[in-house]
Image: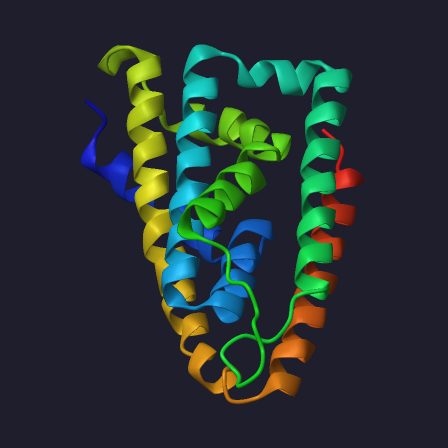
Amino acid sequence: MLSAETVVTFFTASLLLGAAPGPDNLFVLTQSTLHGRAAGLVVMLGLCTGLVMHSLAVALGAAALFQTSAVAFSVLKLCGAGYLIYLAWKTFTAKPAGLPGEHGIEPGRGALYRRGIIMNVTNPKVSIFFLAFLPQFTDPTQGPVSVQIMFLGGLFILATILVFGFVAIAAGSLRNWLLRSARAQLALNRLAAFVFIALAARLATAER
């Protein structure tokens, strides 16, 4: 069992890392503002599901593949970039929702949940980050390292839920104001599309 000091240190570091501006919290921010608090929280759950997969990958050693194989790294990041470009197009062409005479289509919760998973899983840098970050806090004398990795991954996910949940709730509060203005919604859609394109470019040009 890891010491209390190690757990507190790791959890504090995880909270700070979650609060630092990055693709995932920016994704939660845009989805919450576009579709409301509930949408942001569902996206957050999808992102956290992706983090579970990354934790498993580190525990099983699969994450090392993305660190050593340029082909695997490139294929996964290009898939992620392509998906972000697709979301940018969907957002750019979306109609305002909730206004008389308008029939904007809101994505279902299943679609939002999948967005979160795909956004997270197709970013190989998350696996590499976990591969570099989590083992630093393990102690082979305290039991199987793979079990410790999963425990630390769970703590990181808890920190992510706290930070991203706050982002989703705060950003979602703008939704009611946006529903009163078609112009504001269209401007936000354009801005969100730009953000997705920027995230896609960042991911596509990422190096190991």
Q: What is the residue that sits farthest to the front in this orientation? A: 101
Q: Is residue 78 above or below residue 178?
A: above
Seen from the viewer's position, the closer of residues 9 and 149 is 149
Q: Where is residue 152 in the image (x, y as percent from the top left)?
A: 33, 31
Residue 55 seen in the figure: yes
Q: In this view, does 179 lie above or below 52?
A: below
Seen from the viewer's position, the closer of residues 114 and 22 is 114
Relative to 2, is 33 on the left or the right? Answer: right
Q: Quadrant of residue 139?
A: top left
Q: Quadrant of residue 37?
A: bottom left
Relative to 151, is 61 on the left or the right? Answer: right
Q: Quadrant of residue 7?
A: top left
Seen from the viewer's position, the closer of residues 141 and 99 is 99
* Residue found at x 57% / y 83%: 101
Q: Position of residue 63 (x, y in %)?
A: 55, 19
Q: In this view, does 161 lie above or below 96?
A: above
* Residue found at x 62% / y 30%: 124
Residue 12 seen in the figure: no
Tally of numbered discs: 0
Q: Quadrant of the N terminus?
A: top left
* Residue found at x 53% / y 27%: 132
Q: Where is residue 28 in the image (x, y as percent from the top left)?
A: 49, 58
Q: In this view, does 50 lie above or below 22?
A: above
